[in-house]
Image (spheres, coloured by chain):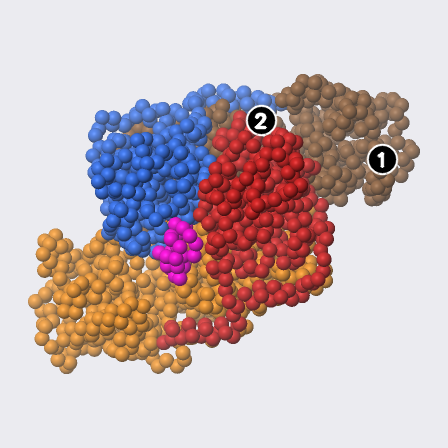
Chain colours: A brown, B orange, C blue, D red
Amino acid sequence: MPGGKRRRRAFALGTNMVTTSHPDASPTSSDVDDSARSVIRVSEHTVEIVSDSGEGAQKCGQIFGTVSAKMGNGVWTVEIIPAEIQPPPRTPTSASGNRIRIGTGPVSNWGDHVNLVVAFNEQVLLARHRLDALADDAFILIEDMWERHANADIRTAWHDAMEELDGRSYRIIRVPMEEQCLSVVENARRGKNMFALGLLAWIYGRDPDRVREQIVEQFKKKSDDVGERNVELCELGMRWAEEHLDFRVEVRPSPIDRPLVVMNGNQATALGAVASGMELCAMYPITPATSVSHYLGDIFETFGGIVHQAEDEIAAAGVSIGASFAGKVAFTVTSGPGLALKTESIGLAVMTETPLVVVDVQRGGPSTGLPTKVEQSDLLAALFGQPGDAPHVVLAPATIEECFHCMVTARRIADAFRCVVVVLTDANLATGVQPFPRPEPDTRWHAAPVDLSAVPNGRRPYEWDPQSGLSTRAIPGQPGGMFTATGLAHDEWSKVAYDPESHQRGSDMRSRKLAVLHQTLKRPTVYGGDSGALLLVGWGSTKGAIEEAVERARAEGLDVSSLHLRFLSPLEPGLKDIFAQFDRVMTIEINYSDDADAPFITAENRRRGQLCWLLRANTLVDVDCWTRVPGEPLRPGRILDVIRAKLQLAGRT
Amino acid sequence: MPGGKRRRRAFALGTNMVTTSHPDASPTSSDVDDSARSVIRVSEHTVEIVSDSGEGAQKCGQIFGTVSAKMGNGVWTVEIIPAEIQPPPRTPTSASGNRIRIGTGPVSNWGDHVNLVVAFNEQVLLARHRLDALADDAFILIEDMWERHANADIRTAWHDAMEELDGRSYRIIRVPMEEQCLSVVENARRGKNMFALGLLAWIYGRDPDRVREQIVEQFKKKSDDVGERNVELCELGMRWAEEHLDFRVEVRPSPIDRPLVVMNGNQATALGAVASGMELCAMYPITPATSVSHYLGDIFETFGGIVHQAEDEIAAAGVSIGASFAGKVAFTVTSGPGLALKTESIGLAVMTETPLVVVDVQRGGPSTGLPTKVEQSDLLAALFGQPGDAPHVVLAPATIEECFHCMVTARRIADAFRCVVVVLTDANLATGVQPFPRPEPDTRWHAAPVDLSAVPNGRRPYEWDPQSGLSTRAIPGQPGGMFTATGLAHDEWSKVAYDPESHQRGSDMRSRKLAVLHQTLKRPTVYGGDSGALLLVGWGSTKGAIEEAVERARAEGLDVSSLHLRFLSPLEPGLKDIFAQFDRVMTIEINYSDDADAPFITAENRRRGQLCWLLRANTLVDVDCWTRVPGEPLRPGRILDVIRAKLQLAGRT
Amino acid sequence: MTDATCSLLGCGADEDRFYAMADYAEGIPRWCAGCGDHAILSAVQRLLESEQLQPEQTVFVSGIGCASRFPHYLSTYGFHGIHGRALPVATGISLRRPDLHVFAVMGDGDCCSIGAGHWIHAIRYNINMVALLLDNEIYGLTKDQTSPTTPQGYPTNTQPRGSYLPALNPLSATLGVTNASFVAQSADWVPAHLYATIREAYHHKGFSFVRILQRCPQYTASLFEPAARNPDLTEVLVHDRGITVPELDAIYRNRRVHDPTDLDQARQLAESAEKIRIGLFYRNETLPRYEELRRQAPHGADERNRLLGEELDRYAV
Amino acid sequence: MTDATCSLLGCGADEDRFYAMADYAEGIPRWCAGCGDHAILSAVQRLLESEQLQPEQTVFVSGIGCASRFPHYLSTYGFHGIHGRALPVATGISLRRPDLHVFAVMGDGDCCSIGAGHWIHAIRYNINMVALLLDNEIYGLTKDQTSPTTPQGYPTNTQPRGSYLPALNPLSATLGVTNASFVAQSADWVPAHLYATIREAYHHKGFSFVRILQRCPQYTASLFEPAARNPDLTEVLVHDRGITVPELDAIYRNRRVHDPTDLDQARQLAESAEKIRIGLFYRNETLPRYEELRRQAPHGADERNRLLGEELDRYAV
Ligand SMILES: Cc1ncc(C[n+]2csc(CCOP(=O)(O)OP(=O)(O)O)c2C)c(N)n1
Ligand SMILES: Cc1ncc(C[n+]2csc(CCOP(=O)(O)OP(=O)(O)O)c2C)c(N)n1
Ligand code: SF4
Ligand code: SF4
Ligand SMILES: [Mg+2]
Ligand SMILES: [Mg+2]
């Protein structure tokens, strides 16, 4: 969206804010009269709240995000998670919290830079500063107790930090959070987050009742007075802001014209599984997938389903295969290292044509890699990981809403095609929070109840339709359907058969199903124009960032469009034709590729992005790629730079 | 070689042989005088000996093959293995034995059809007939006791079989093996194989002393008289042949100009490992890889090495990684299902840059598939199986000789590039037997002895050369080198680091090494002409069959050449240029691809051969493929048909 | 579960049909002549017949190996999976279909080597199924490699100078796992005892682990032949609540009274002695069963959607 | 092995340097405040110091988990591998480098869940190494999921209505495995005993398995706090050939004499009782050690090539 520009305009209106260069000029404690108070009107704004891990900044961020969504703002929330189990406090590594980007229209990604940040100490603030998370003109509300701290080292640390920050034109406002909170609680560490929520609520004019409601909801599992105390702290924050801040930010909400829900991708995936009628989730804990099973662990039994925590990922796969074999399609959820361990089992499900859904919430790799961070580098493993020819379906939702619906799609395909469906989400979708239209559960989404009536006389266990390779499976309990499924080469009777014909036939039939599915897929639609100088192609969680970049680029008059793929196996139809309408095609991915101009790298030996490889092999179009592995979502602005560079290179702007 | 044609000529010389149509005319038991005896002179001939499993046909075939090699014939031996553990006797499923193709020149593959077969019963013969293994004019020497068997069912089975065979113009000769053998042993079942050896020895004029020698060598582990009795049986066979057969076959040997050795691919792989100086092989039994470890189990300790049979493939990978980390490069050997289980460990070795060699003796897949049969369908899994970006090297020997040498290459690359090397052989190489020049072991092939001297001051555990990504590893015991290897993202100090720069840097450095290796590779040479109408591209064990087909096609005046790849990652240089010299390029592979004209299959959704897919992505050339999964090696004649069809299609012949 | 109940009512099933032993047989077993697996197959078929288990209500799950070919020779449902993973697959089946009769058939490599982790945990889960360990103390299908139960010193293809380690004792290992509820041992060459043992296992509610000493004439002929020939080399554990096979008393004269509720004694008896011990080592019917703890009430689609609607409303904006 | 011998001679190594405890420390441990892992790390560092192990001759191997971060906080060599696979990696190291001091550090999920198969077999191999199970009875790093050792009924994120099964007893399981040679238990909150236990484990030639009860204030604070606060809830196994910590006698008054050579009694004592038992349950120095059985004589390159030549000649044409 053109927000990028408009935001800049908006800030032009901002009154001269004090910066560290004139500390004495900081807002006095006396009231600021409304007239002097500037209101910054913008179509979107990005907020961060960061603290040492354990100080509860995330709760504050979640509540702020939810309230904003409920008021009708577009919202995208991203967690800021420390990599370490327990990083030492007051160090950059301990930065923990949330980024919340709100807008008048829908918000589809975390954006470029933060416009306003609330920090509980200067070290976590530094962490964000060093990661270039903050806009040059960002507002910074920071706890200033450290400046006056008894410990001299801390005081020096504070001053060093302030100097480091001084390079930028941040607008720094000192807030005596500790001091304030102590008026309500003895241990301010437990209260600052709600005080901070108050600050934000006032600055962004969040409806106080909704805020209160949400706080109570958040702490309903705790005792009531916990809730009340937190409300009190929040109101304290509002009051302080009212008395001391001379600016507010207005991001006009839009009227909510239809029922929305707001949740993160793992919650959506879990609810999608419920909606699909699947009844068993076998898993082994692994970040960032585990929260799917935490949530299901809470609610699945209410729906007659169970979460089985297996002894390892291989067992989880085996249990879901067994459950599917004997009843409704089951699923297993994991991340990279777990997917690796399921490799052999996926091959077994393919060979026995046992329906199975495998959800891989991708994280940084290879190996244990970056467990909490986003990456899209399991694509080729998901597609080609299994020894032997193991044709199966691979889907990738692009939004949190799609996380919900693709579980239904996956279950249906697994049933209809008697096949394995791998669903690739990632850490960005998993923890990102976004409102989307409330799904209307439909019983047609459910697996049909298992039919245990007798199998028609003489029907073979793999009675492949010679054209489509499709067949109907018999389920234990069905009289006349008895057979022994086997991972060995077999004939239609599921009898072990090693002769050339049988193996060729079985291989044909298992592969044919993908071609049939392919025939049912719709040609994907291009975002932007149907032809032009440059087409970006993406998949998975990068959709929002790519499309925002395209929109901003087009606003700059750049002739760029984008295409986003959900089906990776089989690939969606018409790609070659679509590509043909563009002078250049390149994928944008969060995975590794060699930079074309790096030492020793040639066009011949360059290792390209994973989707890029796939598209080149499939279309023979010279698809280029821009990919990075920053362990964070892509920033639309960065993609915009890539577009500019690519088109300049092409001598077009 | 032009043998195809010449062979036909040869048979033209053959005297009218009796066929089942005039049983009465079968050779009398009276001596056949030499003048009446025809000698068939051919440049190559293919022999099969088949029996019920357990009747020892394989021993017979092995001895025949070895003796032929020692006499200077080109030889290729393939095992005929029943799929079942213990198939019922006298059934087609129990066919067990050897195919031995011998030639005046080198023999590089198992050929098309069998010219002469010795069968212990008519059922195993039928099995071969039904698999279209026998040439129309094949000589068939068959045990005829069944014709006169007490059991009526067996007699009927015999006659039905003879009728089924009657359709072809086989030259069937009845041999009273049982009857003959009983004159030497009580249990003829234990003796027929040596009697049959005698038949073959006489027909092909094998040097009797060498035959005797080889028999003794074969049974040297047993008691002496076992050896003697077997020699006796063999001589009995020779005598019977001399008295009853009115033809001999002469495949002139060539003088042996340099020392040769004759062995199968798994033996070559094992000896190659020894030659490379590796000292630990950790494995878990799996067909067809296990015999590598059986052989090493016998000899490795003599070389200071050990074979460790782990509790599973994951442990086998872990043990070899541990051994490599603490000393010389170690290796693990497996097949498809085991490779699947090593997926995660390979990612760990890549991430920690622990040198590791993984040998995958490919078999039919997916899943447990066809354990004893050849296939080339682990290529993509070997290349892309690991979640996350896990750059590593993939090699595929094309001959039994290369099985030996590529182990040395693999070990050297693993050491020099501090990386993982996957070696892809297959069941055809594993069990095929062929003579090749005796390697001259060279101490430079060995890993340098582990150097435990102190690490230069301040050298980092991953002191990546910024250009090449290469670094020197420290080994436990080296003072000053202490570090903790980790599968998590890390910096040069091997400290866990999740920041964008560190992860991007590490990913770059690990990937860069492949580009550097690529720069050291030679452009592959084309077999045939440097340009033309059609280029076949292959990899692995199909080299012999492809090149024979090309040779025969060129002899027919067809403008076809072939290219064979050993390096699959990184790919060998110059491919795009080479392909540009040909009108059409197609891969020939033993793995699955959709037939272009099958129902529902379109150019867009067609799933292609694995190398084909790789080459398309890499070169953007419209590489086609012809692939099959028959569970047996490709026949040069079949490839020849493909060439003809492809070129006709191209309207060129 | 709807389906479960439904099939328990046996919809479509032919309730009053009588099944003869032959009705449970399928194809020609492809094991070597004299392989103990043949006898074990017969004992199992005898059980199916005597209990009149409906073939469609019965599932045999296996891994990979000679032993694991078992399901192919039965007319029931079967799942011949991958090496070492029979128990997870069987667990998945039992979890969703407690109405089915589930048997897991494994070789010693399958269960005790590559499958060891699943084995330990299946014992813990104590899900109602019969787990048969067909222990020939060798890797048969892959042709003669050392297995965890191969006796120390016994030469194999991978350890030609004799297997290095003392054999793992599957009974002791099982008895060491918390929640173990049924542990027995029998031998393929004592069909009456084998049948009685499998029957006892079938009637036990929980994870019934039966180690069956199995002859492999192909690779380990020497290991069990003496015992198979001479009953005096075997000791039978007897108890009025144990496995009783009166007809054997005459032949197997070494008998030891053992109370299968005594875990400590069970562990002591499980330790290898000079005699092979067969019988019921341990049984405890009071232990928690995972599939029971996880049993779910049936839910109609509409009911579910209503509940799902409520859940979604918790996220309503 | 050449290298081994060479490094035994300590080529390049600084023999007479004295290492202080601080010399073994590396970085700032990133465990929660009050996490038992801190105390375990100190006990280990104390061992390294008291035994003056050369950092370059010492390797700590781990899997993935809070516990598995261990090697990062030591100045020795380390291998922080993948979840559940610490033991195979440690096995590979010990097999080729018996000269090194090898420690494997695992969490309860690492060792008893995903790593269970390797655990059982490592016990069998009885390779000379110290295996430390840091048992907080929960999955810590992944934030509060049930582990095999989580007490029945204890609520976690994956089993919020209480963990379903009785906890697996790692001591009983270990004692059930043939060739187990050293089994002990200690607790992070009894540093003197912990140190003495690890020292005993280090001096045992073979696979020394030590289960360390480890506090996880983050997720299982309630489980060990009572015992940590009140010594009367603990029973110390004592024996003149066991683990002796005289200074504890005053505080820990529940003491039971147990002969660590008595396997049956060890198994009985291992069974959970109302009191937590710490001490040496079992030790047997006479059992075969795999790395000893597989030890190889050094071979020069030329010697090898000569032998290889001979081998090749067997195939000569
Ligand atoms: C993942 C995997 N690893 C290895 C194999 C090869 N394999 C097949 S059966 C088997 C072991 C057979 O021994 P056991 O389990 O004792 O069964 P038995 O044949 O003796 O009855 C092995 C190692 C395989 N099929 N899959
Ligand atoms: C193959 C694989 N599966 C799962 C995970 C996720 N994971 C990391 S640590 C862990 C378990 C942690 O529990 P524990 O082993 O008891 O160690 P603790 O953190 O409690 O010390 C899991 C499941 C992983 N990293 N790799
Ligand atoms: S190899 Fe052994 S176990 Fe396998 S079928 Fe033959 S006798 Fe039975
Ligand atoms: S989560 Fe528990 S185990 Fe992990 S560091 Fe914190 S206290 Fe220790
Ligand atoms: Mg076995
Ligand atoms: Mg733990």
The boundaries of the magenta stretch are C144-167
The reply to whether the magenta stretch includes residue D83 is no
Element carrying mark 1: loop
Give me the chain letter of mark 2: A
Horizontal side, residue D155 vs residue C124: left or right: right
Near-viewer residue (B156 or A628):
B156
Point 84% across, 43% down: residue: A160
Point 36% across, 54% down: residue: C142
Tell me the mark number nearer the camera, choosing from 2 and 1.
Answer: 1
Judge whether residue C306 can be spotted in this image.
yes
Quadrant containing the N terminus of chain B is: bottom left
Farthest residue in the left direction?
B24
Position of C39 relative to B288 (above/below): above
Q: Identify the mark at residue A149; answer none if there is no mark.
A: 1
The reply to whether the magenta stretch includes residue C146 is yes
Position of B372 relative to A371 (above/below): below
Q: Where, by quadrant of the figure, is residue B265 drawn?
A: bottom left
